[in-house]
Image (cartoon, rainbow, N blue to C red):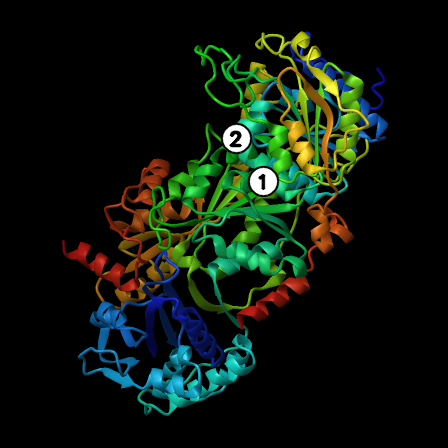
């Protein structure tokens, strides 16, 4: 069984807290959960909502169809009632005026007032939700006590209990109690992955939807003994991270597309000076300010090509929180190994969707730093020694008396000294770019999902992996054609073996992307000559759902 | 001059350039402070002054134009044992890097910035800089610069900088003393170094400076902020040299206990058990 609930209202009504409480209660009861948060770029008012999908089976994605609406205002009902199932329910306060047979007019506000805190009427509604699904109060009190203290905690518990008495049970769903799971979003998973990788320095400028990384890391600053520095601008943020990395610590910066635009010159510096760096770009619709709190996959090519001239670089698109945790560790390792900038591509959908995943396995963390094991005296050490792989020995400044580490954004010789020599220039440019061919050995092929020998092959990358997986189940259950998908994580350099193999047997290839022009399809064609016959694209800032993909593929089929 | 641990290297600077004297003074200052080359990091942006890390045997970070301060501050945060010094020109420090100048004074990391202020862009061949006098004529400003010159020392004092000094490349002993005092100061320190550009700046020449500069005497008290601001505004017929303002205050590291008391960040090993425990937040 899968149920999809929507909690909606104006910003400032405490919805985030409400959603968090319900998520945690359901999670601890043992349900699988997928939550998406849709919010406007404003602090008060407007219309924001959470969709909490819970099930006693594995769920990969959010859904469109709603089992219930918990409306904190009338706008919520008006906006979403068209997606409500015929046997669904609407919970709203008795004073909300709306005509619908599925509506429960509940004494939410008056009950909260009686309890002595009119602001917590949402908790009354939560109590009613628990009753409607015949869920008991186990784990509820713990969650409330973790979220609130003293009198407020007591009032919220009273509100839940009072809400429980407002309705009678309607649904039956038993959880598959599963231990070893966490409820986390991709932003938190990136931050946790960075900490597990030994991150010591994070500098960033606040920008939605990337700010959550800084928030989480800052909350662990003293415990983890890391520095989280809010820079004066994105240019400072990336140059600080590069300076810290030069000095020998693992460093990272994070931003969204507009911020990455400001960082571009320094991305080239990291490549030129061969200083390892991890950059997170949490995409939002652009260009310019765009839609700050919404989602898009519009920065694919920008992330790949954001530097003047030609540089070695790696771009990894994150698929989900679990993937993000391990890929963040891999990004640090490969940045260190090849002494290059590595970009992690996330997006607002990943940043603001929370899901249940298996506990992260810390035994899989590999923190090799690839520092030189040699001892150096001044005459011997060449920071940019020309080698077969293009990778030069790296030491930490100050590590060896008599030895200097000289890095340069100008073209330089093996010692880091400025040069305009044509011979040295060629040797150095070739050395830097040579790292890309060795990097190919570390590239991961995409995940293949769906039926073997598919006649229709979907191509997707990053955050769309989950909805595409769910869409494949719908498509393959519908009979007839066989559907498969390649779900890319590494996008640059582009892994092409599985792509070449699978595209040969497929009758039709469709790219599924959240951008207007099919950036990935164009990248695939540029790198491999393989063309997509159709595409499913969405660029209104709202996440693409499995149902939409299903409809898009079927629409293309009949056309 | 005693170069101590820092041997001479051939430079690409013009003969007679003030940069030569500044480099010599720096070597002298580091020798006096008994610094070994591997203990020092010199960070620069881009420009003629910014080539300095190439010509001294310390660690060097020749970064991007205007962006010397961010990596310098971060390197010091990452490894507090490094002595971190920024050398760059007036265009790099006050123009392209203006925002970092403002905010690194606020950040107050224990680094020292030496600005080679020749009131002109040298590397790009003679355009007005943020500190060029109003009316200064260049190829790009043929009718003279219309802009009000930026007063870096006044600005730094106003922003709460704990050490603000001015020196002149033509007076090496005094310059060296200012450098030593700046490096010794705990927190961000600025030394604005007046420096003729013999190739492009035909106005602010050695002679022009020699006729105007004077050293602040023992009767000058650098602890008084209002007096310091008044002194910092003196420009024209008389230009004061010396420590204009000094104030002891907690620096960046003082405010973060594990940075202040523990090992340098670069020597810390992550405690994976502790980090694994952070997963409890997501139960």
Label 1: state its secondary structure. helix
User: Which quarter of the picture shows residue B81?
Assistant: top right
Residue A334 found in image quarter: top right
> Looking at the image, can residue A393 be seen?
no
Density class for disc 1 (Cα within 10 Å; few <14, some 14-19, many ≥20) is some
Classify B78 as above or below B114.
below
Residue topped by disc 2: A433
Q: Residue at x 30, y 58 (%)?
A: A544
Query: Which type of secondary structure does the marked residue at label 2 adopt?
Result: helix
State the residue in front, B226 or A58.
Answer: B226
Return the x and y of residue A22 as percentages of the image width and height: 43, 77
Residue A319 in the figure: left or right of residue A358: left
Residue A272 vs B2, above or below: the answer is below
Query: Are there few (<14), some (14-19), or many (20+) residues within 10 Å of tag 2?
Result: some
Please report, as a chain letter, where disc 1 is located: B
Residue at 34% over, 58% down: A40
Residue A425, given in percent of the width and then of the height, sits at 56, 20
């Amino acid at each position: 069984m899968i149920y999809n609930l929507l909690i909606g209202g104006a910003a400032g009504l405490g919805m985030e807290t409400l959603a968090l409480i319900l998520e945690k209660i359901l999670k601890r009861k043992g349900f699988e959960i997928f939550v998406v948060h849709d919010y406007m770029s404003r602090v008060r008012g407007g219309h924001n909502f959470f969709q909490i999908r819970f099930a006693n089976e594995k769920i990969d994605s959010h859904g469109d169809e709603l089992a219930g609406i918990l409306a904190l205002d009338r706008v919520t009902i008006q906006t979403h009632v068209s997606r409500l199932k015929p046997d669904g329910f609407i919970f709203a306060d008795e004073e909300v005026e709306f005509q619908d047979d599925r509506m429960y007019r509940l004494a939410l506000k008056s009950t909260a007032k009686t309890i002595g805190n009119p602001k917590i009427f949402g908790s009354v509604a939560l109590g009613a939700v628990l009753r409607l699904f015949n869920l008991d109060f186990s784990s509820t009190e713990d969650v409330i006590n973790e979220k609130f203290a003293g009198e407020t905690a007591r009032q919220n518990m009273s509100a839940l209990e009072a809400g429980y008495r407002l309705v009678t049970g309607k649904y039956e769903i038993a959880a598959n109690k599963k231990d070893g799971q966490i409820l986390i979003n991709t932003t938190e998973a990136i931050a946790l992955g960075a900490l597990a990788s030994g991150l010591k320095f994070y500098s960033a400028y606040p920008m939605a939807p990337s700010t959550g990384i800084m928030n989480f890391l800052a909350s662990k600053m003293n415990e983890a003994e890391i520095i989280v520095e809010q820079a004066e601008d994105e240019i400072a943020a990336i140059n600080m991270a590069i300076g810290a990395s030069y000095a020998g610590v693992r460093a990272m910066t994070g931003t969204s597309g507009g911020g990455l635009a400001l960082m571009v010159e320094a991305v080239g510096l990291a490549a030129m000076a061969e200083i390892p760096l991890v950059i997170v770009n949490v995409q939002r619709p652009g260009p310019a300010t765009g839609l700050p709190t919404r989602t898009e996959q519009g920065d694919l090519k920008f992330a790949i090509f954001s530097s003047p001239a030609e540089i070695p670089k790696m771009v990894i698109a994150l698929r989900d929180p679990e993937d993000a945790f391990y890929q963040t560790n891999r990004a640090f390792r490969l940045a260190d190994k090849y002494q290059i900038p590595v970009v992690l591509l996330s997006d607002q959908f990943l940043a603001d969707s929370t899901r249940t995943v298996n506990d992260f396995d810390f035994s899989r963390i590999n923190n090799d730093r690839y520092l030189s094991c040699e001892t150096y005296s001044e005459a011997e050490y060449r920071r940019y020694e020309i080698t077969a792989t293009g990778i030069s020995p790296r030491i930490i400044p100050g590590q060896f008396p008599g030895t200097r580490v000289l890095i340069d954004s100008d073209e330089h010789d093996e010692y880091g000294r400025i040069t305009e020599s044509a011979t040295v220039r060629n040797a150095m440019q070739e050395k830097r770019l040579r790292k890309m061919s060795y990097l190919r050995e570390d590239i991961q092929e995409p995940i293949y999902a769906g039926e073997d020998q598919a006649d229709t092959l979907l191509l997707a990358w990053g955050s769309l992996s989950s909805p595409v997986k769910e869409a494949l189940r719908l498509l393959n259950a519908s009979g007839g054609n066989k559907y498969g998908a390649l779900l890319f994580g590494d996008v640059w350099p582009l892994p092409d073996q599985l792509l070449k193999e699978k595209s040969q047997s497929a009758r039709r290839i469709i790219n599924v992307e959240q951008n207007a022009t099919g950036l990935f399809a164009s990248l695939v064609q540029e790198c491999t000559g393989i063309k997509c016959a159709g595409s499913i694209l969405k660029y209104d800032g709202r996440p693409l759902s499995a149902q939409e993909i299903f409809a898009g593929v079927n629409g293309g089929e009949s056309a | 001059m005693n170069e101590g641990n820092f041997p001479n290297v051939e430079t690409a600077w013009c003969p007679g350039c003030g940069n030569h004297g500044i480099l010599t003074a720096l070597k002298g200052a580091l020798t006096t402070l008994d610094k070994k080359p591997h203990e020092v990091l010199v960070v620069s942006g881009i420009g003629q002054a910014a080539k300095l890390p190439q010509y001294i045997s310390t660690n060097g970070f020749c970064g991007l134009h205007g962006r010397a301060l961010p990596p310098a501050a971060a390197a010091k945060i990452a490894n507090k044992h490094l002595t971190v010094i920024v050398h760059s020109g007036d265009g790099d420090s006050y123009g392209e890097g203006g925002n970092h100048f403002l905010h690194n004074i606020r950040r107050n990391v224990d680094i020292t910035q030496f600005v080679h202020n020749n009131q002109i862009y040298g590397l790009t061949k003679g355009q007005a800089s943020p500190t060029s006098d109003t009316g200064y004529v260049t190829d790009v400003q043929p009718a003279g610069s219309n802009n009000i010159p930026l007063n870096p020392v006044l600005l730094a004092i106003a922003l709460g900088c704990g050490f603000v000094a001015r020196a002149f490349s033509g007076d090496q002993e005094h310059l060296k003393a200012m450098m030593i005092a700046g490096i010794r100061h705990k927190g961000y320190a600025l030394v604005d170094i007046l420096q003729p550009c013999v190739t492009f700046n035909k106005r602010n020449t050695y002679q022009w400076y020699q006729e105007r500069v004077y050293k602040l005497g023992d009767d000058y008290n650098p602890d008084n902020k209002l007096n310091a601001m008044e002194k910092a505004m003196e420009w024209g017929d008389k230009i004061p040299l010396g420590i204009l303002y000094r104030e002891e205050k907690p620096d960046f590291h003082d405010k973060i206990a594990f940075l202040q008391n523990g090992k340098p960040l670069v020597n810390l090993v992550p405690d994976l058990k502790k980090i694994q425990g952070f997963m409890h937040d997501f139960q």
